[in-house]
Amino acid sequence: MTDSKDAWAEVDRRFSEFGRIVAERHRKAGEEQSAPPPAQAKKSLEEAFSVVTRQLDVAFSAAGDTIRDPEAKETLKQAGKAVMNALGSTVSDVGNEIRKHRG
């Protein structure tokens, strides 16, 4: 089952790469928005809600920007292909194991 393990390691690598892209975009978007961290926000419910709203806006904007980015699209596409390859390899390995035991 080495092929399956290698295939799933590739899935991990591809999604980790995509995750790094999303995290970097979120970090940059947060810097651009310059929203105050929640710890510094005043305790009033209205201000806390405003901080949460801004943070959600930053997160969704970063996600949207990432999805529109050609590099991120390609990375996600490669991650999807890696999943399909890993699934195919796993199914093949399982079939081989079943054939061995039926023998």
Image (cartoon, grey):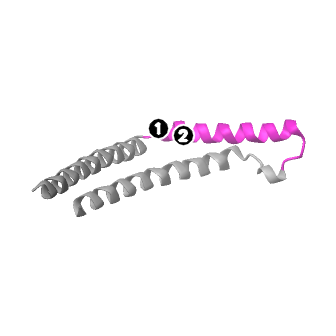
The magenta stretch spans residue 53: yes
Q: Which residue is mark 2?
A: 63
Depicted 22 relative to depicted 63: above or below:
below
Closer to us: 69 or 94: 94
Q: What amino acid is found at the position of numbered circle 1 in the picture?
A: Ile
Magenta residues span 41-69
Q: Residues within 10 Å of mark 1 (few under 14, many from 20)?
A: some
The magenta stretch spans residue 56: yes
Q: Residue at x 88, y 46 (%)?
A: 42
Q: Which residue is mark 1?
A: 67
Tell me whether the residue at label 2 lies in contact with that at label 1, contact meaning CB atoms closer than 8 angstroms: yes
Q: Residue 70: where, in percent of width, then height? A: 40, 40
Disc 2 and disc 1: Cα gap in Å?
6 Å
Magenta residues, dominant SS class: helix
Judged left or right of residue 74, residue 66 is: right
Judged left or right of residue 10, residue 61 is: right
Disc ID at residue 6:
none
Q: Residues within 10 Å of mark 2 (few under 14, many from 20)?
A: some
The local secondary structure at tag 2 comes to helix
Q: Residue at x 30, y 49 (%)?
A: 82
Judged left or right of residue 28, residue 67 is: left
